[in-house]
């Protein structure tokens, strides 16, 4: 079926989103055109505002509307404790836990030479400079357990060791409320390697 050029343009625009194929994009476009004109205009305004107004924090590389994001500019956060994460969604997950009171460094990906993602693309030169400044006392590695995540963790570990900064890694293994029969072998092996003393 042929669409009007503006409709086709709208459908194609939606397909840039992850997980949105041509059919889903068409449904979204039709929903806005059929009964959501005001919502569509709000969406367009929000997109325009975000694309023009959201940059990266100069300190942690998270999304920010000013030079520093709200976390980096919060004086109650511990600047000597920095958690290394792969994406802004990881920051949200930690913040929802309510347990972490330090700051973050957001890589916006993981090392993947085949995809052209090296240390510079992840801002590791910025992290190295921060480590040299001497304010960071501990890095917490919270990258994934994929090959890329492990390579990234080891690269950051080398940077931290060169700067004399201690490094820890978040525990990985069996989730809370999980039954062992549903946990895969690699996750169980990781849980066994990361075991710690049990205390009351």
Image (cartoon, rainbow, N blue to C red):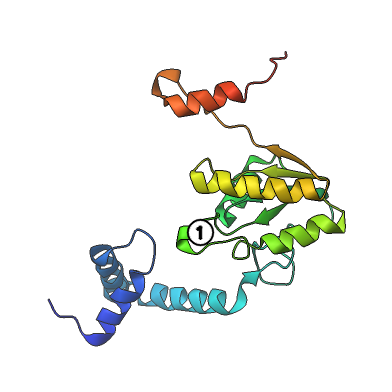
Residue furthest to the right? 134
Residue position for label 1: 113
Rendered residue at 61%/77% (across/down)? 53
Task: Provide the secondary structure element on which disc 1 rests.
Answer: helix
Q: Is residue 20 left or right of residue 44?
A: left
Instruction: Give coordinates of residue 104: x percent, y percent.
Output: 70, 53
Total numbered labels placed on residues in the image: 1
Q: In which quadrant of the rendered view does residue 56 lie?
A: bottom right
Question: From the viewer's perspective, is residue 108 above or below residue 66?
Answer: above
Question: From the viewer's perspective, is residue 140 above or below residue 86?
Answer: above
Q: Is residue 188 visible?
A: yes
Rendered residue at 69%/15% (across/down)? 198
Q: Is residue 17 left or right of residue 153?
A: left
Label 1 crowd (10 A; few <14 / some 14-19 / many >=20) = few
Residue in the foreground of this view, choosing between 167 and 196: 167
Residue in the foreground of this view, choosing between 8 and 195: 195
Q: In which quadrant of the rendered view does residue 57 lie?
A: bottom right
């Amino acid at each position: 079926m042929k669409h009007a050029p503006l409709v086709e343009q709208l459908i194609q625009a939606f397909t840039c989103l992850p997980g949105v194929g041509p059919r889903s994009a068409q449904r979204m476009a039709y929903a806005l055109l059929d009964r959501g004109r005001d919502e569509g205009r709000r969406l367009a305004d929000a997109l325009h505002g975000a694309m023009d107004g959201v940059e990266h924090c100069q300190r942690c590389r998270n999304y920010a509307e000013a030079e520093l994001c709200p976390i980096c500019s919060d004086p109650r956060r511990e600047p000597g404790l920095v958690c290394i994460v792969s994406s802004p969604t990881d920051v949200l997950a930690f913040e929802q836990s309510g347990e972490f009171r330090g700051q973050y460094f957001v890589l916006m990906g993981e090392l993947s030479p085949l995809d052209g993602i090296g240390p510079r693309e992840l801002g590791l030169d910025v992290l190295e400079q921060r480590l040299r400044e001497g304010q960071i006392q501990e890095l917490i590695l919270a990258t994934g357990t994929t090959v890329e995540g492990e390579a990234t963790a080891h690269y950051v570990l080398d940077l931290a060791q060169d700067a004399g900064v201690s490094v820890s890694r978040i525990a990985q293994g069996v989730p809370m409320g999980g039954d062992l029969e549903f946990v895969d072998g690699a996750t169980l092996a990781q849980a066994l390697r990361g075991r710690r003393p049990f205390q009351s």
